[in-house]
Each structure stands twice: as structure tokens, then as C-alpha cells.
Amino acid sequence: MSSDLCSVDFEIHGHVQGVCFRMYTEKEGLSLGCVGWVKNTNKGTVVGQVQGPRDKVKEMKVWLSKEGSPSSRITRAVFTNEKDIPHLEMSGFGTRY
């Protein structure tokens, strides 16, 4: 039986630091029922991982690539390592430093 859960890594490019992108990502992830983490990189991007039901992870990918925080300007969203997972590997949605 295949799992309905999946995991995906992301990197968001554009004006995504200093605009509360991480806070909004946490909020959106939790509201969708996903778990994961998000953090700023030293090259001006935001990276992270989202896990959850496949349809919710898909919604999160759309949000990350098209919407983001109100003041952000997303130029590119890269999603990698998308895979089925048997169970969630973390709980909650947090910011890493």
C-alpha cells in the first residue's frame, strides 16, 4: 500500500529575507496541517522541508512558489528530493537558524 504522505525540500529565490517569509511559511504550513522547517541562507534564499499529506504538500508548494509573505517577491522556487514517506519524520513547523 502506498503512503499518502510525502516530503519535499525547497529553496525560494527572490526578495524573501527581511520580509517575514519564514514566519508566514510556518503559519501556512501549520494551517495546512503540514510539518517541516524553514531557514534563511547566507546567499539570500530561504530553504526548508515540508512533509504531510500529498495534497497539502502540493498546496504548500503553490503557496511557496506564488504567494509567500505579503512583502516578498518570489522569482524562483526549486523543489527537490520529493518522495513518499511512511510517516512524518518531525512534528510542528519551525524556523532553523
Image: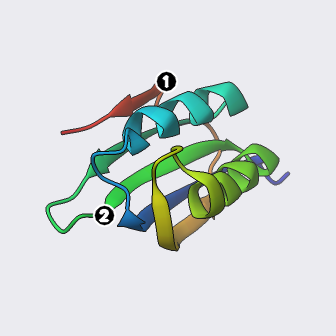
Q: Secondary structure at mark 1?
A: loop
Instruction: Measuring from the top left, give residue 96's x and y in whole percent.
Output: 26, 37
Q: Residues within 10 Å of mark 2 (few under 14, many from 20)?
A: some
Find residue 45 and name its label: 2
Instruction: Residue type at mark 2: give it.
Output: Thr
Dividing the image into 4 quarters, which one contains the C terminus?
top left
Instruction: Measuring from the top left, give residue 15's x and y in whole percent.
Output: 36, 62
Instruction: Residue type at mark 1: give it.
Output: Gly
Residue at the front extreme of this rendering: 71
Find residue 78 and name its label: none
Query: In which image quadrant can residue 67 be found?
Result: bottom right
Residue at the spot x=50%, y=40% of the render? 25
Residue at the spot x=14%, y=61% of the render? 42
The relative height of residue 74 versus residue 25 in the rendered view (above or below) is: below
**Do tag 1 and tag 2 residues touch (Cβ < 8 Å)?**
no
Q: Secondary structure at mark 2?
A: loop
Residue position for label 1: 92
Q: Residues within 10 Å of mark 1 (few under 14, many from 20)?
A: few
Q: Which residue is more in the foreground, 64 or 36? A: 64
Residue at the spot x=53%, y=70% of the render? 79
Relative to 15, is 75 on the left or the right?
Answer: right
Q: CA distance from mark 1 to mark 2?
A: 22 Å
Query: In which image quadrant can residue 53 be found?
Result: top right
